[in-house]
Amino acid sequence: MKTNSAARLILTFVLALTFALFAFAQSGQPASQKFEREKLVEDFQIARQALEEGHSGIYRYTKKADLDRVFDATLKSIDRPMDVFEFYRVFAPAVAAIKCGHTSVSLPDPIRKELNNSTPLLPLEVKVLNKRPYVFRDFSDLANPAGAASLAGKEIQSINNVPASRIINTMLAAVGADGDVESARDVRISEARFLSNLVSLLGLNSPYDLVVSSPGSKHHQKVRLNGVELPKLIEASKARYPQDDPSGPDGTLTFADDGKIAQMKILGFGGFVDTEKKKGLREFYKESFEAIQTKGSKALIIDLRDNGGGEDELGQLLVSYLINEPFKYYDDLVINAMSFSFAKYTAVKLQIPENRVEKRADGKVHAIGHPNWGIKQPSKPHFAGKVFILINGGSFSTTSEFLSQAHFHKLATFIGEESGGGYYGNSSGFMPLLTLPNTKLTLRVPLMTYYMAVSGYKQASHGVIPDYPVEHTVGDLIAGRDKDMELALKLARGSNHTHTHTYTHTHELRPLRGRLRLARRPSSSVLADQP
């Protein structure tokens, strides 16, 4: 996800706290409260108008006629009084139909807080692998009799008599992700989101009656699990599986084979590499490529798995160390208008400085003041060796922009699974949050659409497809084996440099850094329904 640092260079916005809008959202809104149909319709129409007015990439992946049909069908389904969960279950899939990973709808604050703090959740960490749910970590002993065998490694067949296929399809239909990138959707319904979705989207609550099986086995096992509150699950995860901790500096550099191979890992495009020295990625890049040059490294492995994005300029700057000629990063940045009628439902007042944009004949506003705008120059020291980049469905937003540039300019070989963001750009930048006046659901609307200066990629609704797809088994994940890095090291050592090899196993995500949440998510609430 992009930070607001880049947006500040293009959009000047003044915080105008509107306490009246949020007073009810901070109160104890009961989840069982029913809203009259007219109030629900009003909220939906406000949201639809805001999306159509403000989202400059709303029809990038879904044609207007098709999205109109989705919105019209959703409106027709609002045919009775509903509580906030019932409304959320019809509203979220309509928003997800836009196929934008930065667009999201969230439950009201008090209800999300209840999910975060006091709702008994399924006491398992679940990974969705190729649209199938597997138990990665088992915390059921926190609320259930000791002595039961661990469920880790089991495939979930059903929960409370609801088949796993229905559970997964319901979640996938309500999750926002760019275009047709399935790897991103699997990531976004895994871990804590899976647990909260059982409650919010499917109405499944503790106790949880599960049917599980070993992968490939026809023998099914039934088990009843009492729920556990999320804070207890997080505490147990920290204590039992410190290796799952996603924290750490945003950039690290190590060397293998006496310096012949450099390994750069970037957790996010922002933050600090050294907190005490306030050293960020700009300094890290320069020092790292100087060290790589000094070592005489012949190959560089860049690990961008589960990097959810960050500051726009940091993606462009990384490209500049890998390319040896001037390049264009963005082709266009588009905003629909200079002001928006839905601003009264937000806590911010948007002001777009006229000297930073151009209003053209198409009636839209084109940003020209972005630091990535125009022709960019290479940075020194340039790395001219072989580059291998590790990617997966969690490689999103700013990361995806970097990846499309690296792919377009043929700067690297890609290993892993399809990256999480669209190849030709995304809609993000400044993303005001609307609070709907009746139900208090919130809607995040990205106002700026980025168009990358790339071309010739035929799979326009997808991310970067890896040259070397890597798939794993759930057993590999539990064992912590990193086959992506194993293959990258093998290729870097020169045993196989062709682009025709495929390194596959039964599908799963390689070991993720996320602990009971989406890796590197910007929200302070791990169950917030945000991208």
Image (cartoon, helix red, strand yellow):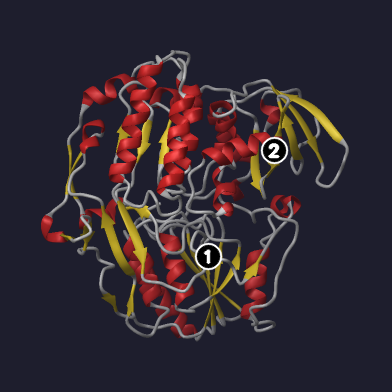
Write down the residue under mark 2.
165
What secondary structure is found at the residue carrying circle 2?
A: helix
Does residue 286 appear to the left or right of 225 in the view shown? Answer: left
Q: Quadrant of residue 382?
A: bottom left
Q: Position of residue 426 (x, y in %)?
A: 39, 56
Q: Residue at x 57, y 61 (%)?
A: 418
Q: Quadrant of residue 369?
A: bottom left
Q: Nearer the viewer, residue 445 or 1?
A: 445
Residue extending farthest to the left is 355
Q: Quadrant of residue 439?
A: top left
- Work out how far the residue at label 1 is from the one at label 2, CA to CA, in angstroms: 27 Å
Which amino acid type corresponds to the residue marked 1 in the rendered image? Answer: Gln
Does residue 290 appear to the left or right of 434 in the view shown? Answer: right
Q: Nearer the viewer, residue 254 or 506?
A: 506
Q: Residues within 10 Å of mark 2 (few under 14, many from 20)?
A: some
Write down the residue under mark 1.
459
Which amino acid type corresponds to the residue marked 2 in the rendered image? Answer: Ser
What secondary structure is found at the residue carrying circle 1?
A: loop
User: Along the polypeptide, which appears first: circle 1 or circle 2?
Assistant: 2
Q: Residue at x 41, y 15 (%)?
A: 35
